[in-house]
């Protein structure tokens, strides 16, 4: 099994955590989004990450990949049991992949990725200030209303929904945005529980080397 993509993508991170938590034997191949590598493009015609090769199967899009892994390798379950709870879990995953990405991705792009790409203009701090004042708190307020006081979104087990809700927060942190835990205490505690899960810690440990290379 091969999972393609850049470590710091919240979507690649989600797929890597799912595969790690399930105990799957896989190799992570670092590929940047938009790569023209023919093998990668054969799996991901839109050039988006992550992409997956598992035997004869190829797939792209993190949600499709994670759902495939859940169905193909069900020994460690990462969706709740009932249809009602699964529907709710898929909604949380969608929210994490869209609204949470909108809330945090720009901090990483402006303060980390631009420099890596050779853009010497510096971060657009005015744009980031507007985001921090008017967008990110709205998304965090919703998360605050949904996360439990303890455990994860669906009990004591880490599921795909938990990873999706938190993954973009990691990118925001890389870009210097820290959640106001006085204003959003449940969200901060939930984030810490997810980041402290062994599968997440293992993926983030490997990711650190990538971030160190970016900073060099």
Image (spheres, helix red, strand yellow):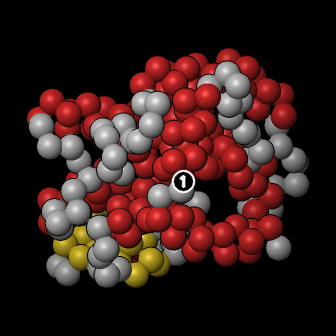
Task: Check the picture and name the quadrant holding the N terminus.
Answer: bottom left
Count of numbered marks: 1
Which is more toward the observer, 216 or 115? 216
Q: Position of residue 165 (x, y in %)?
A: 46, 40
Which quarter of the image is occupied by the C terminus? bottom right
Residue found at x 73% / y 20%? 133
Residue at position x 29%, y 57% in the image: 66
In the visual, does 15 lie left or right of 90? right
The x, y position of residue 143, in whole percent, is 49, 27
Identify which residue is drawn at 55% across, 20% down.
141
Side of 127 where 7 appears, left or right:
left
121 horizontally vs 55: left or right: right
Q: Is residue 186 above or below residue 80?
A: above
Single out the residue that lies furthest toward the left.
83
**Residue appearing at x 44%, y 65% in the figure:** 199
Q: Quadrant of residue 208?
A: bottom right
Give coordinates of residue 185: x percent, y percent: 61, 28
- State whether residue 35 appears in this view: no
Q: Position of residue 126 (x, y in %)?
A: 83, 28
Please say whether residue 191 is visible from this viewpoint. yes
Graded by Cα atoms within 10 Å as few (under 14), some (14 to 19) or many (20 or more), the crowding at tag 1 reads many
Q: Looking at the image, is 207 positioned above or below residue 190?
A: below
| Element type where label 1 sits in the image | helix
Report whether 42 appears left or right of 30.
left
Q: Which residue is mark 1?
A: 195
């Amino acid at each position: 099994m091969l999972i393609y993509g850049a470590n710091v993508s919240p979507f690649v991170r989600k797929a890597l955590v799912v595969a790690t938590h399930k105990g799957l034997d896989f190799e992570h191949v670092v590929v940047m989004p938009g790569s023209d590598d023919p093998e990668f493009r054969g799996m991901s015609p839109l050039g988006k990450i992550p992409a997956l090769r598992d035997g004869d199967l190829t797939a792209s899009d993190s949600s499709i990949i994670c759902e495939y892994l859940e169905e193909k390798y069900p020994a460690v379950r990462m969706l709740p049991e009932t249809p009602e709870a699964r529907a709710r879990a898929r909604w949380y995953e969608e929210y994490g992949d869209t609204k949470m990405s909108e809330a945090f991705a720009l901090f990483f792009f402006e303060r980390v990725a631009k420099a890596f790409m050779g853009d010497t203009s510096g971060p657009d701090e005015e744009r980031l200030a507007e985001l921090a004042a008017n967008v990110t708190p709205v998304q965090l307020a919703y998360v605050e209303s949904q996360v439990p006081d303890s455990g994860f979104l669906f009990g004591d087990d880490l599921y795909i929904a938990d990873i999706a809700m938190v993954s973009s927060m990691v990118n925001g942190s890389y870009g210097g945005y820290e959640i106001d835990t006085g204003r959003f205490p449940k969200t901060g505690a939930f984030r810490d529980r997810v980041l402290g899960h062994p599968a997440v810690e293992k993926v983030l440990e490997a990711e650190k080397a990538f971030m160190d290379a970016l900073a060099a």
